[in-house]
Amino acid sequence: MTSEQKPMQHRVAKVDSEITWDMFLSQANNHGLYIKVVVHFSAFWCMPSIAMKPFFEELALTHQDILFLLVDVDEIKEVT
């Protein structure tokens, strides 16, 4: 199996609630050791958001020192 045929590993964490959002942000600020966070606010009806998703996932694979989060704006209105 070549590198092009290997399934892509996902390193993007899906935020499914306000509690999960708070948990990820608190982990990013763990004991003053700040971790960079990049958030993709998306919606199933937003074509630019859909087009950006593969690029966002690729960035997450290449920048493993950064926390990448995915938030569906229609599901989690509390954090948008």
Image (cartoon, rainbow, N blue to C red):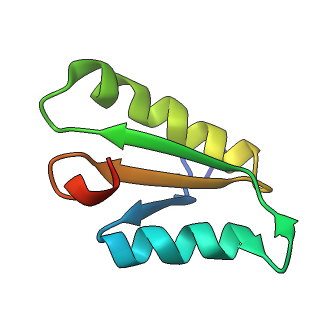
Q: Is residue 35 left or right of residue 50?
A: right
Q: How many marks?
A: 0
Residue at the spot 76% in from the left edge and 46% down from the top edge: 63
Q: Quadrant of residue 73?
A: top left
Q: Is residue 2 visible?
A: no
Residue 62, compared with residue 16, is above or below; it is: above
Residue at the spot 48% in from the left edge and 72% down from the top edge: 22
Residue 15, compared with residue 42, is above or below; it is: below
> 37 or 10, which lies in front?
37
The x, y position of residue 34, in whole percent, is 82, 62
Q: Is residue 10 visible?
A: yes
> 21 or 72, which lies in front?
21
Q: Is residue 1 left or right of residue 44?
A: right
The x, y position of residue 10, in whole percent, is 52, 58
Residue at the spot 84% in from the left edge and 80% down from the top edge: 31
Residue at the spot 55% in from the left edge and 71% down from the top edge: 24
Residue 17, compared with residue 5, is above or below; it is: below
